[in-house]
Amino acid sequence: MKIKIINPNTTWSMTEDIETAGKRYARNGTEVYAVSPATGPESIESMYDESLAIPGVLSEIIKGDREEGADAFIIACFGDPGLLAAKEVTEKPVIGIAQAAFITAKMIAPNFSVVYVLDRSEQVVRDVVRLHGMEQFCRSCRSTGLGVLDFDRDREAGLRALADQGRRCVEEDGAECVILGCAGFVQFVDALRKELGVPVIDGVSPAVKLCEVLVDMDCKTAKRNLWSNPEPKEILGLSDIVKF
Amino acid sequence: MKIKIINPNTTWSMTEDIETAGKRYARNGTEVYAVSPATGPESIESMYDESLAIPGVLSEIIKGDREEGADAFIIACFGDPGLLAAKEVTEKPVIGIAQAAFITAKMIAPNFSVVYVLDRSEQVVRDVVRLHGMEQFCRSCRSTGLGVLDFDRDREAGLRALADQGRRCVEEDGAECVILGCAGFVQFVDALRKELGVPVIDGVSPAVKLCEVLVDMDCKTAKRNLWSNPEPKEILGLSDIVKF
Amino acid sequence: MKIKIINPNTTWSMTEDIETAGKRYARNGTEVYAVSPATGPESIESMYDESLAIPGVLSEIIKGDREEGADAFIIACFGDPGLLAAKEVTEKPVIGIAQAAFITAKMIAPNFSVVYVLDRSEQVVRDVVRLHGMEQFCRSCRSTGLGVLDFDRDREAGLRALADQGRRCVEEDGAECVILGCAGFVQFVDALRKELGVPVIDGVSPAVKLCEVLVDMDCKTAKRNLWSNPEPKEILGLSDIVKF
Amino acid sequence: MKIKIINPNTTWSMTEDIETAGKRYARNGTEVYAVSPATGPESIESMYDESLAIPGVLSEIIKGDREEGADAFIIACFGDPGLLAAKEVTEKPVIGIAQAAFITAKMIAPNFSVVYVLDRSEQVVRDVVRLHGMEQFCRSCRSTGLGVLDFDRDREAGLRALADQGRRCVEEDGAECVILGCAGFVQFVDALRKELGVPVIDGVSPAVKLCEVLVDMDCKTAKRNLWSNPEPKEILGLSDIVKF
Amino acid sequence: MKIKIINPNTTWSMTEDIETAGKRYARNGTEVYAVSPATGPESIESMYDESLAIPGVLSEIIKGDREEGADAFIIACFGDPGLLAAKEVTEKPVIGIAQAAFITAKMIAPNFSVVYVLDRSEQVVRDVVRLHGMEQFCRSCRSTGLGVLDFDRDREAGLRALADQGRRCVEEDGAECVILGCAGFVQFVDALRKELGVPVIDGVSPAVKLCEVLVDMDCKTAKRNLWSNPEPKEILGLSDIVKF
Amino acid sequence: MKIKIINPNTTWSMTEDIETAGKRYARNGTEVYAVSPATGPESIESMYDESLAIPGVLSEIIKGDREEGADAFIIACFGDPGLLAAKEVTEKPVIGIAQAAFITAKMIAPNFSVVYVLDRSEQVVRDVVRLHGMEQFCRSCRSTGLGVLDFDRDREAGLRALADQGRRCVEEDGAECVILGCAGFVQFVDALRKELGVPVIDGVSPAVKLCEVLVDMDCKTAKRNLWSNPEPKEILGLSDIVKF
């Protein structure tokens, strides 16, 4: 089985961390590989960034489906950018890491909080909580005030900021599980578990496991209506990026 | 890995069907076994039935955890009876089949409908839809008007009733996925997929796969507060049934 | 008229307090009596405790209905354990004390808060708030951190903890009415009214009065479908406890 | 105990029917009397009608509280017009008949439907369902297409229209209880119970019983903030109608 | 085009401030005039006040429609008192200032908070937030603790109180826009914008602009059913106030 | 004042219809011009189409803001594609036509229905209803089954399909206002008003008027946090399309 992870931003050092996290619990026989698209922003912290990342995400999904023989896809950015559009262009399973994190959290805890990057990214985080119908289980969303790439530049400071906000989620907001609201946080998951004493969940590892489940059971995306293939039509000026 | 499925009712022919469904997609190396408790009703179609089934369910979970070396548990009745209480008595993962069906449906379809047994069981079905926060994705709940055990007595009539209601879910309610709202329906899943032309999901098979995911990743139930172990206390008259 | 109160736990000293509270405003001619079931936990603070209390509750309701000539029933534990199942086994009115407290609070105040026992019992409290559709009127739920039986062991400390949390409900959360989230708190109702200066409501006394209303008006539980009598069926191993 | 019912419209023949319904289940020792205000519309079928009825309602509540020694008040029009304002002008209990009907229905049935007068009155009915937080328990609201006073002019036609819509509530919408959405329907309650085979609830009789409960228990309206007495201030041109 | 603003209270100094605010952004060719009704309270801070203001509001709308040739109407009190009833009595557009403020805020900001007068007025404010379906966009409602007329008596203190609460909305609650929850606050809008550094919105000015939009486009109120003209009927004792 | 309308698809015949509709009620002195981006699909009927249209939309907004001196922007496709991202890249007002239609409908009607193109576009329509918090006012969404461009190919058939579905919205769903759920439907608005007898609203004309309101009042988009300018960062491969 072949699982393709798409890191929607174009920072390949993050893509490598994500691939490592994706492989962590993968079964023998599951091939996991991660890529960044050829187009898009170096990090995703706003709706604008999301919008410019999505064409590249779709491009990688189409390529993975038509040319690379991938069996399932993961969109590895916490806003799950392009998730619904991606389901339209392939019948193979596509999972977002926010979705995977929510599913996992809900199976082992009564509620959760999300820690994320910049204050402004709250829009992206709340939207994806809502997209998956998780409002009632989400105790709080807390930002660290640091940008996506800051966590790579100063890992120590990044960890401290996450531990700090995570602790407030647990102690002040009553969260019994902390979800890491950025794919780049996968590097901190073990350290945070020790610090916080509650389950800490990144979405990348469980997304791979959930893809295995769907492929094992031969589950395909429903194509009756809402997520059926897009109507064939002329699309100007993006043919180098997306070829459906 | 050892996964114990508890069929909360005491009809062992159903338990066997459930075990078969549970084994269907299990990995090599995953041992799946299903039991019925020593106490409880022969079928579960009301809140009263649920109430009398739960002590036996808890008993089997405690036995599985303390004596049988099970790594994860599945409650195989569509109302997920006793799910939250079960999470309190073990830190090993416990999944209900309604929960597993909802998770799976949501990963591959924009919405779903549930077909179930008697009209009166609507209470049980709607409660479990709500427990898992799925109201907004559930297009409809339709009953077949047949009791749980009727489906074993006349499989042909059972299949016809399910296909009938399933078709109405798809055509009248716009459902793009049909969830089988009774563990006893696992026997019809293949026939219904052919009939309905949309994904048809029973909760038992995916519940086993989701248990594998959680055990692979060493995920334990959050024990900080809400689902922490029950306080030790005297419990009169049920000590033959539940020994915590 | 004969009203049977069932204290779902097996601590008879609490049952006596409850009976006293139940008689407090009962009319002449209303006979009020309280019992604990023969089976179940000595206190109810978790979903596990609730699950093991419910068979005994149902047993007492059936006995009250078939043998004792009771006209109405009260389940006197704040989670209203077994309420829906109880409505299935009799057509005589059954009221939970959480339900009675919510109804009364809503008739005299724009909103309310609930004070309850252990932190972990939040699950039970929030579930019953939701069961009765009261989320939008509930300003907050605050725990005292004390167990059910602690309030009997040290009444002074219990009262102090309740007054403390009650004050925070009023002053910090804007509650205009405080609901006592445990049947065992009936002993503190007068003291708390003086302390807090807002209406303080225990569910036991109003539950008796609401039963009188329903019996006076000859109201019976709707039996058309959802709450109709359970289907007759074999129930293993609990026949000493529940005989339907 | 003295309970004053205010029929917010000025049609005294309806006021008499309402008084009869109010006395039906009242205890010995409860004095029930019904009045119409000196000002206001002859029937209430729109928001405009409601707006012009409310000053008269408040006038009667103030008079009942200050001059007539009434112990509790009932607003007997299904939109509960002026209910919140009325709570501000007295600390004695005030109950609306929609509120009383909802409370009663919820104690004996899992859900309900409301049948009401003109199509246009849907606005009034849906608002009061929402005011009391009952959306999730309300299966449907169905109008008869007849005006309030039509039911007095041709009782037979009125009963037929109600039975017709009531039957659709039960059979098509799954309602297990039918609420009469107009005070003038009290005359049909017995006939409809026979016709429909489910509980049929008018709000007037239970409102009286709920007032008895609150007075028996010496419950007063919370006056800490939201429903505290209005600030004293000059009010132009209505002093003949409302004297606070 | 002629736009009539009704200040529902009878304090003409406020009416003048409101007229000034209404004219501020009006186009050449738009005539804006503001009145207070002949009846009603000098300020509106409770549901009681609202109830007594509404007949006068309706009276002015009817007069404006039938006699004064007004093309559109504005109800200039933050609870939008009588808004739905007003729509019944004319087919010309009627807008409330809360509605206008919400619409404007939502076009330029992701969320907002409301600052208002007395603590007790929270009931009025929350009701109008809910009437317009704005709960999910409203970060907080904060009171200044001052009465409507206090802001005229001591403008300095009023401004300080508003700036103080406004700052807490922004800094503690994350509001990105502050709505002034009282028509009398129009005088502070410029000062508050400077103080708070986020958009500050009073409802009066945008209500005039939105009326211009509707009149320009010849939009009339939907009269099919819910907001159709009231049925003609006898209305006792208010004929001096409201003549429909 | 200069208002730029962006038709997110690349079919210029539609862009011309949209420009005509945009000019219809514009004031003297308001310059309205409509463009299609250089990139993107010829019609928008799926999430995939939306995703590929958004970069071009953002490009046109940035160009309009930085180079063309536009004062406000309209996104003229019913899903309001890119609306939140657009607000990030300029502080000048940006309005979507769905948003404009909802605002207008709500000012003149108690509820509305939306008629749209293909069945599959329901996803897009329901998402935008939810984005603007309009679920509770939306009676129904009905598709015509025709694609965006079909309405240009056979206008007669298009009109018939719209009238047909519009009539069902009014008669079966109780809608009092019909919203046209596609920018291409502007050509049918007059014919449909005559046919349906209720207000029929296209979003393009009111969006222009609402832009005039915001520009007249000098309202700027809130830039404190969620919609602040995107962080400057490297964006690969789209620099020909979007230059921020």
Image: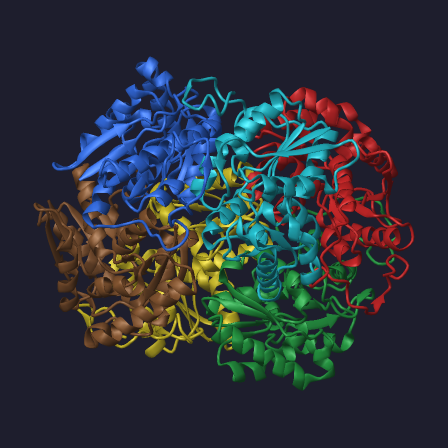
Chain colours: A red, B cyan, C blue, D brown, E yellow, F green
Q: Position of residue D71 (x, y in %)?
A: 14, 45
Q: Where C169 falls versus D103 (above or below)?
A: above
Q: Position of residue F75 (x, y in %)?
A: 68, 64
Q: Position of residue C22 (x, y in %)?
A: 23, 31
Residue for point 24% across, 27% down? C19
Residue for point 72% across, 34% down? B212
Front position in the image: C239 or F160: C239
Relative placement, left or right, of F221 versus D112 is: right
Front position in the image: B192 or F115: B192
Relative placement, left or right, of F67 versus E128 is: right
Q: Most extreme residue toward the top, as rendered?
A: C154
Q: How many marks?
A: 0
Q: Position of residue D157 (x, y in %)?
A: 25, 76
Residue for point 56% across, 42% down? B77
Q: Where F125 falls versus C146 (above or below)?
A: below
Quadrant in the picture for residue B96: top right
Relative placement, left or right, of E72 versus D19 is: right
Residue for point 49% across, 73% down? F172
Is residue E146 something one can see in this rendering? no
Q: Most extreme residue toward the bottom, as rendered?
A: F156
> The N terminus of chain F appears in which quarter of the rendering?
bottom right
Is residue D17 something one can see in this rendering? yes
Q: Where B243 falls versus B81 (above or below)?
A: above
Q: Most extreme residue toward the front, as rendered?
A: B153
Quadrant in the picture for residue D123: bottom left
Front position in the image: E10 or C123: C123
Front position in the image: B223 or D167: D167
